[in-house]
Amino acid sequence: MAEEQQVTGWFDDGSADSPAAVEATTYLEAIRAALEDELAEDERVVLIGEDIGIMGGAFRVTEGLWQRFGDARVIDAPISEIAISGACIGMAISGMRPIAEFQFADFISCAYDQLVNEAAKLYFRFKCPVPIVMRAPSGGGVGAGPYHSQSPEAVFAHCPGLKVVCPGSVQDAYDLLRLAVADPNPVLYFEHKALYRSVKGTLQRRRPSGVLQRARIVRPGRDITLVSYAATLLRALEAADRLQREGISVEVLDLRCISPLDFATIAESVRRTARVVIAHEDTRTLGIGAEIAARLSEFCFYELDAPVARVTSPDTPIPAARSLEEAFLPSVEKIVAAVRDCVAQ
Amino acid sequence: MTIAHDKIETSAMPNLNVEIALALLRWMDLSRAIEDKLHIMKRQGRLPGRLVTGRGQEAIPVGATLALASHDIVCPLHRDLGANLVKGLTPEEFIRSYLWKTGHPSEGRDSDVHIGDLRRGIYPMISHLPDSWPVALGFGMASRHLGLERATLAFCGDGATSTGAWHETLNMSGLFKTPNVWVIENNKYAYSTPLAKQYAAPSLASRAAGYGMPGVEVDGNDAVAVYEVVKDAVDRARAGAGPYLIEAHTMRVEGHAVHDNASYVPAALVEEWKARDPIKGLREQLRQAGVGAAQIEDIAAENRRCVDDAVARAEAASSPDPTRMEEEVYAPPEASGWVLPPRRITARDQS
C-alpha cells in the first residue's frame, strides 16, 4: 500500500517559481507540489498531521516539506484527530490557512464533531469563514480492508457548509488542492490512494484560476453521459474507450467536487445525450449518485430516453481479500454493461 | 467527594482592589439580573425555547474574563453569560438571542446561550461539550505561530472533562506550550451525574500533571480569587510560559435547565452552597473594605433598569427573515477578512 518508493526532491529544482510543465508527474507528486507551492507562496499556510514531518506521512505525500519548511510550517501532531481538526479551525479564524492530513480517510470519523458541528456551521451561524483544508486518503483497490479503504465523501456531502472535492487526475490533484486552500470555507479533500502512483501526467505548476465547484466534461460524446469522479473516473474513461469500439459515443463527466454539486453541467450534458449512467466507488444507498438521480428525475425527466442507471459498490463494508474487493468495486466491465443496457433501452 | 480546602486558592482579602471588586460585582449582578428576568419571562410564557442559567456560578466566568484584555479570546459555555457581558455583548443582544429575534450576532441562526461575537473575541459555544476546546487550542497555536500577544481562555464543566476532545486538547496544549488558560467549572453535577460517578482522580486539577502543565484549584464562588488566579495564568501564557489548568469549585444550585427540578441532588448540599452565594459574598467583601451600602445597591438598581429596557426593546424587535437563508451557508470567495479583535504583535517576536 504505502510503497517504499523513494521520490526524489524533484521539486527542489526551482520549478515552483516557473510555470513550466512537469511531465510524468504522479498524482501523489502533484499533491505534494500543491502543498509545496502553497507553503512557498503563502506564509499563512501550515500543514498539520500525524507523521507528516521527518517521515513525510504514511504515503510520503509530504516528503521533503518538513526538511525545507521546518517545524513551524509542517507540524507533526500526536494521534489526536479531534484536536488537530479543532486546532485548524482556531488557526483559520486567526488568519492562517491550515491544511490537515488524516492518515487515512477512515479516521476522519474521529473528527466528525469538529468538522460537521463546528467548522461547517460557523459561517451560517456567525458569518465566520473557516478556511481549512482536510486532506484524507480515501478509496480501495489496494487490499487494505474495511478500515483503510473507505470512501466517506457522501457522509460529508450531506452536511451543509462543507465542500467536498475528489480529484481524479494529476492536474486536478494540484489545482483542486490549491483552490481548496484559497476557498474561505472548510474543504474536505479526498485524495484517492489507488491513484497516488498509478496515474501519471503532465502537471502545469501554476496558481489555478476558477472556483472549486465545477464539474468538467473530460471526454465529449453523443450517445450517453457517464458521470463519475476519483478512481472510478479512470475506469469510466477506459469503459468509454471500449464502448467507442462498439460504436457507442460516451460523454464522460468528472464531478471533481461532489459538494456543492455542479448540477448545471450534469443537466446540460444529459439534455444533449438523453441517457445517463453514474459510476462511483462509494456504496449505493445515499451515495452521491442517488442525489444526482433524484435531481435528474426532478429537472430532466422529460428529456431522458431511459431510466438513470447507477454503477456503485454494494451496500457492504469494503472487504479486504482481493477476490472480495474486486467484486465490491465498480469495474470497467460493470460500467460497460450498464452503459450498453442504458443505450439499448 | 471531599475537597481539601487547604489546597484551594482564596482571595487575599487585605489587598482587595475595590475598583476591580466593584467591576466584578457589576458584571455578576448584571448576569444574574438578566437570568432572573428570563426566568420570570419563561414562567409567563414569554420565552419561546429553553432556559439554561449559571445562577450561583457567576464568579467564575466574570472573575476569569475580567482578567483578559480586549484582544484576548474567551470561549464561554452555557453558564457563562457573565463572560459574554464582560467581553462586550449587550444584555439586549443576549435577550434577543433568547427570543429568536434579529439584532444579535447569529440573527436567529442559533439561539439562547449559543452566542458570541468573534469581533469582540467571544467564540460561540455549541452543544457538544467541550468542542470549543480544540478550537481554543487552535487560537493558542495561532498566537504562537503569528507572534500575537494573545491569551485564550476556555471554560468547561466537570462533565466535559470525561470526553476525548478534552484529553486530546490538553495533551496537545501541553505539548505545544500554547498560551491557553483552561478553566473547569466544577459545579458537582453533570445533569444528574455526581462527581463520584464522573471520575476517580483526586481532583480535576491534578490531571494537569499528566499534560505537563500546572494545575490549581480555586474557590469558584470567590470572584476576586478567580480573577487573581486567572490573571496570573493569562499573564504567564502571554509571556510564553505555556498553558494553565484551573479547577474552580462551585455548585449548580438549580437544575440542569429550568425544566429540571434536580430532585436527585441532596437538598442539604444545595443549601450549603446557596449560603455561599458569590454575589452575596462579594457584597460583604466590599462592605468590609468600606464601600457604602448605597453604592452597592445602586449597582443592583441600575442593572435591573438596564435589563427591563433591554427586554422591552428585544420584545419589540423583528423576527429573522428566511428569504436568503440558503445563500448564507457558504462564505463567498472574497470572504476572508479578519473577524477577531485587533491584533497585537509581541515585542519578542518582532525582534
Image: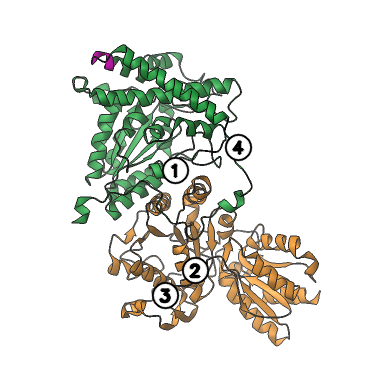
Question: Closer to the camera, B337 or A115?
Answer: B337
**Which amino acid type corresponds to the residue marked 1 in the rendered image?**
Asp
Question: Which label was assigned to residue B52?
Answer: none
Residue on which the image places disc 1 = B131
Q: Is residue A229 magenta?
A: no
- Kindly report the distance in space between the C-alpha atoms of the residues bearing marks 1 and 3: 35 Å
Q: Establish if B266 lies above or below B247.
A: above
**Which amino acid type corresponds to the residue marked 3 in the rendered image?**
Glu
- In the figure, what tint was chain A given? orange
Question: Closer to the camera, A334 or A274?
Answer: A274
Indicate the position of residue B239 as horizontal and vertical percent values: 21, 45
Of all chains in the rendering, the one displayed in green is B
Instruction: Locate residue B252: give its quadrant.
Output: top left
Give, as a single range, the part of the protein colored magenta: B285-291
- Kindly report the distance in space between the C-alpha atoms of the residues bearing marks 2 and 3: 14 Å
Residue on which the image places disc 2 = A176
Q: Residue at x 40, y 54 (%)?
A: A92
**Which amino acid type corresponds to the residue marked 2 in the rendered image?**
Leu
- Kindly report the distance in space between the C-alpha atoms of the residues bearing marks 2 and 4: 40 Å
Indicate the position of residue B158 as horizontal and vertical percent values: 40, 32
Residue on which the image places disc 4 = B319
Q: Does the magenta stretch include residue B287?
A: yes
